[in-house]
Image (spheres, coloured by chain):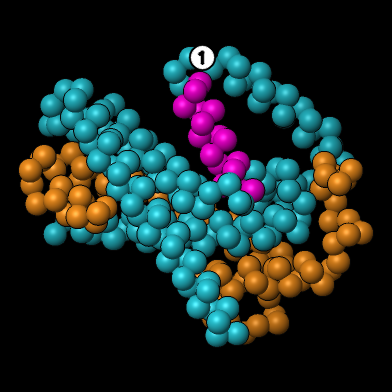
Amino acid sequence: MSNRRSRQSSDPRITDDQIIDLVSKLRLLLPEISQRRSDKVSASKVLQETCNYIRNLHREVDDLSERLSQLLATIDADSPEAAIIRSLIM
Amino acid sequence: MASKHTIATRHAQGIRARFASRFLRSLLRVRRSSNRFGGSQSNDEGIGKRIRTDRIKIAAYAAMARAVGPRRTWSRALLFKLRNRARIHGVSRKRCLVSEKKRVTRNKVVAISREPSRADTLRKLVPGGDSMDTCVLLEETAHYIKCLATQVTVMQSIADRLLL
């Protein structure tokens, strides 16, 4: 509790095994690495791939927002698209 | 094992549905407000379109953070940041800048002896990451990635639906 501000990974309450376990769980969520052979991937690589993956997802959200913005501009109030949106919400 | 998987899938479907309904409602609101300020055609060029894009992006992150709720550190941090942004957007930016400076000096004092590790890069990408220790950071990252991927999938399918 008192060490909340310190970011050392040599915190005695966290074991290396716990970190290894969490990193392997994280690895399973990444799209590329989970297809390669298991034990050969380092924690550093997993963290790096995770950062890249998150950045990619953020960029995809930006692109999709722009696409949706364009599509939204072309929808009239009574068009079938607006009805689609309303029906999806109900 | 099988029951854990079904629980996880049901949980994921719950978040997906909650996010989708919130986000769709926000989309309609954005469309209504952008149509109110001038015709829809004239808003396609320049500032109007960028504002709309930003509103949609914020609506997506807000909808996901609300769908997750306050039980995750990252969603709490994201909701906090979005609420502050909404408040400051209407008033003034001075208060926000002052608090940002304080946070930066605190970080500098701690990190002065080592170079940024990969975990630190990750901390900057995950909302609320600065205040997490490594263990919590990895757990939160895993959940954050799952929700982000769901967010992207739902936005994608909405965009595809609107095209047809």
On the rendered structure, is B100 left or right of B107? left
Which shade is chain B?
cyan
In the image, residue A85 lies at what x, y percent?
21, 51
In the figure, is residue B136 to the left or right of B50? right
Looking at the image, is B32 positioned above or below residue B27?
above
Q: Residue at x 54, y 17 (%)?
A: B93
Categorize mark 1 by other alpha carbons within 10 Å: few (<14), some (14-19), many (20+): few
| Colour seen for chain A | orange
Q: Is residue B150 visible?
A: no
Judging from the image, mark 1 belongs to the subunit labelled: B
SS class, disc 1 = loop
Give the camera-side residue of B59 and B67: B67
Instruction: Work out whether B92 lies above or below B33.
Output: above
Magenta stretch in the rendered image: B73-88
Quarter placement of the N terminus of chain B = bottom right
**Residue B138 figure quarter:** bottom right
Looking at the image, residue A34 sits to the left or right of residue B110; the answer is left
* Residue type at the position of mark 1: Ser
Q: Magenta-highlighted stretch: main secondary structure?
A: helix
Is B37 covered by the magenta stretch? no
Seen in the picture, residue B111 relative to B86 is either above or below; the reply is below
| x 56%, y 34%: residue | B81
Q: Position of residue A14 (x, y in %)?
A: 85, 62
Q: Quadrant of the C terminus of chain B?
A: bottom left
Q: Which residue is mark 1?
A: B92
Left or right: B9 in relation to A44: left
Examine the structure image and report whether residue B83 is included in the region drawn in magenta: yes
Q: Residue at x 77, y 66 (%)?
A: A19
Image x and y of residue B57, in percent: 39, 42
